[in-house]
Image (tube, rainbow, N blue to C red):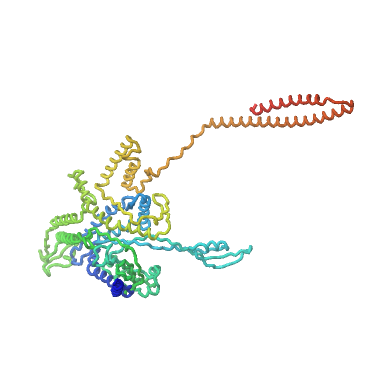
Amino acid sequence: MYKNDIEQELEDLSDIPVPEKMTEDDLKGIVKSEVDDAITWQEGWLSSERAALIDYYHGRPFGNEEAGRSQVVSTDIRDTIHAIMPPLMRIFFGGESVVEFTPNGPEDEAHAKQATEYINYIFQNDNNGFKLAYEAFKDALLLKTGIIKYWWEDDLDVSTWDLTGLGDDDLAVLSADPEVEFSIDSQSVDEFGQNVYALTVTRTRSNGRVKLASVPPEEFIVSPRATDVRTAPMVGHRRQATVSELVEMGYDYDEVLEHAGSDKLETSQEREARRLDNQEPFYDAKDDAMKLVSYVEAYMYVDYNGDGVAELRKICMIGSACDIVANEEIAFHPFVDLCPDPEPHTWLGNGVADVVDDIQRIKSMIMRNMLDSLALSTTPRMTVVEGQVNLDDVLNTEIGAIIRQRNPGAVQALETPFVGQHAFTALQYMDDLRENRTGITKAAVGLDPDALQSTTKAGVAATITAAHERVELIARIFAECGIGPLFTGILKLVIMHQDAPRTVRLRNEWQDVDPRAWDATMDVTVNVGLGTGDLDTKMQFLSMIAQKQESIIGSMGPDNPVSGLAQYRNTLASMAEMMGFRNPGKFFTDPANWQPPQQQPPAPDPNLIIAEAEAMKAQAEIQNDAARLALDREEMLRKDDLERDKLDAEIALKAAEIRAKHQGEVDVAQIKADIERQRSQDSADAQIIGSLAGRGL
């Protein structure tokens, strides 16, 4: 029974269809359909609306102008954006770092600090982050959304030299370098029989870096059903790339050149509106390598491998037919979006221009009518009796010119009173309406002097604070929804792709940065200046904090548990940063990095040096005298030994003479005793001399 159950289960499982891998044609059809839907949705209404906003920004005519009437255009959109940009840029770039990374544990403290410095370096130094942010912020304020793209690019630095006079050893060294390739141009033999070569040497070095770009809004495509860019079913970047660029990316030259040609992106309404009036609308390259090709990078969730789960894939296509030239699975797509006024449950919100465009149109109409009224009041229309007036004289507007008429009253002016004064009230109302919608008041761009005549300092401060709230809200949205995810993406890229340490200058010190050991899940905090109060108020608070810290340190010592030297230094550094000094370390050293200076010996007294020199000289003379006495003693002892030997010989000789003369015994002992007595006396004298020499006397 058990065996039958297993067989039945296996038979049931065999009936379940096994998912199959998607074919290239199926993938092309799915991706092309999604891309076409996104482009159609975007060009259906979004492109025309953005093009109109660009025209408004540049103050171009509306198209309803009449000949002979005023055609002035108010520039409220441009004025509002120009008023928002300075404080917005100051908020993000007023400090030393745009973001800070927060460690997940105490073991990550050093990595988080270095990551903060290095990722900010990549953003601001490697990619000119200020210009990048300026472009994206401006796109967001004017065109509803600003797009920033980030990716890792493996650049290759190629250098070529022609070298001569190289030998076999030089060739061996070049051959051992994996980055070097060379070709032998000529070979000869010198007078010593050694080979001499002339080479062409090429060095290729990998120089991978994180790249950032502000993407024009018309080049960014997104699925129409998306509610958020980060989770959209499909996002993409469609652009026109040259044949040369695509070949450098590794694509086949003939295949790329086959798809070169015009693209409807060239005639995009946004792109045409962005062109200057005297700019060439189309680019017609004569060189094949510089011809333009439609290139789309689509990042789409699709079940390509047939496992039933859609994975995120990067699919690259060229030409109007969307032929797939690259297909790979990736972890995340490289886009972040900025929107000053996001709409819930949809990826596209509103820009500042969207709430000002109608005001600009209304103000333009009011100003035109006002100027027309002024023109009619100063140069009124004329009535003439036909045939009674010289029309050339009537049409001549020169001041003081004569009008010839046959009968009096044949020429009369149609008096038109000036009613423009009533338009000023309407213009003021529209300005107030714009301020209420955008939050940009006179206080945001500089107070009107008249507003200060009967206003207290507190009232002015309240007005300025209220005016900045809307800008600060926009900055907070940009920080949380765009800049934070951007820096998190940069951190992931360097951890994934940087495979060797890189030496960069951080905080005026050269450091080797190796991100392979960092934690990619570190939290990021965007340093935007959104605290309460203005700069003066913050400086006052910091001054009060510094005074309290000085009092605590003075009464409790620098190692107290409340506020020590490290906290006091942080306060002073914050004050320096707030005043615009990006490196407070030039003024205040971090106590954690402080090393006590080495004690230098005091300068010697010249008189003491002279006295020591004289003492050393005297000691040397004493030692020389002692050495001389010791030498004399040694010589005396040698002479004594020599005399003793001679005396022994004399004794023996004398004894022999006496024996030979008297033929009797000789008292040799008596003779020796006399000689020993004399030698003892000589030895005692030598010891006295040696003792005196040893004491330096």
Instruction: Note whether 165 is above or below 590 in the view shown.
Output: below
Nearer the observer, 331 or 239: 331
- The residue lying at 22 percent from left, 63 percent from top is 346
The reply, left or right, for residue 69 in relation to residue 614 is: left
Residue 115, how many percent across, how many down? 36, 53
The quadrant of the image that shows the C terminus is top right
Nearer the observer, 22 or 345: 22
The reply, left or right, for residue 695 in relation to residue 496 is: right
Nearer the observer, 440 or 583: 583
Residue 398, how many percent across, how many down? 19, 62
Image quadrant of residue 31? Answer: bottom left
Image quadrant of residue 309? Answer: bottom left
- The residue lying at 39 percent from left, 51 percent from top is 506
Residue 470, how many percent across, how many down? 22, 53
Nearer the observer, 182 or 689: 689
The quadrant of the image that shows the N terminus is bottom left
Instruction: Note whether 574 is above or below 619 in the view shown.
Output: below
Instruction: Note whether 595 is above or below 481 in the view shown.
Output: above
Image quadrant of residue 189? Answer: bottom right
Number of marks in the rendered image: 0
**Could one spot residue 203 in this view of the protein?**
yes
- The residue lying at 38 percent from left, 44 percent from top is 592
Give the residue at the far front of this rendering.
Answer: 1
Residue 11, how many percent across, how many down? 30, 75
The reply, left or right, for residue 176 in relation to residue 541 is: right
**Could one spot residue 277 in this view of the protein?**
no
